[in-house]
Amino acid sequence: MTTVLVADDDADIRDLVVFKLEQLGLDVIAAPDGQVALDEVRARRPELVVLDIAMPGLSGIDVCREIRADPQIANTLVVMLTARVQEQDVEVGFSAGADDYVTKPFSPRELVSRIQSLLSRSRA
């Protein structure tokens, strides 16, 4: 079964994304902040991680950089899900190693489609 981690300090958004991904039959891990997310990625090795940027402690950018720097988990797919919409914010996200960048407010259907697309391309 494919495992996905969702990290967002907003419980409503986190719960919505978890619900939508579980509807696809994915095994979903929820994390309330960046440090928990990084610990879970290292321990459980999900195929894909959805990260909010603005979280207490480690930001999504920090988590993404840590993932890319660790050879054991560097191939983990990363999707940034954030309210940061400025061009330089998007640039920072991709520079940190994100595979995709989705801005809030977001369409749950679009997010799910992007995640499915990344997962299917990674398996090809």
Image (cartoon, rainbow, N blue to C red):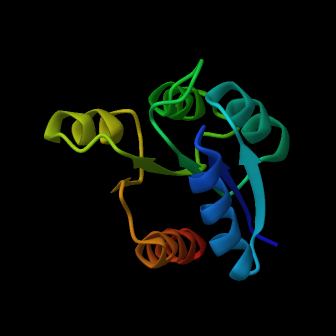
Estimate the x, y position of residue 20 in percent, counting from the top left.
Answer: 63, 74
Estimate the x, y position of residue 112 in percent, counting from the top left.
Answer: 52, 74
- Rendered position, 58 above or below 73: above
Q: Residue at x 49, y 28 (%)?
A: 65
The count of marks equals 0
- Rendered position, 115 above or below 36: below
Left or right: 9, with 93 as reference point:
right
Estimate the x, y position of residue 30 in percent, counting from the top left.
Answer: 74, 49
Looking at the image, the residue that sits furthest to the left is 87
For the C terminus, the image quarter is: bottom right
Left or right: 72, with 87 as reference point:
right
Q: Residue at x 71, y 81 (%)?
A: 23
Q: Residue at x 41, y 53 (%)?
A: 99
The answer to which of 97 and 27 lies nearer the viewer is 27
Estimate the x, y position of residue 95 in percent, counting from the top left.
Answer: 31, 35
For the N terminus, the image quarter is: bottom right
- Rendered position, 54 above or below 124: above
Left or right: 26, with 92 as reference point:
right
Left or right: 65, with 101 as reference point:
right
Q: Quadrant of residue 58?
A: top right
Looking at the image, the residue that sits furthest to the top is 57
Q: Quadrant of residue 89?
A: top left
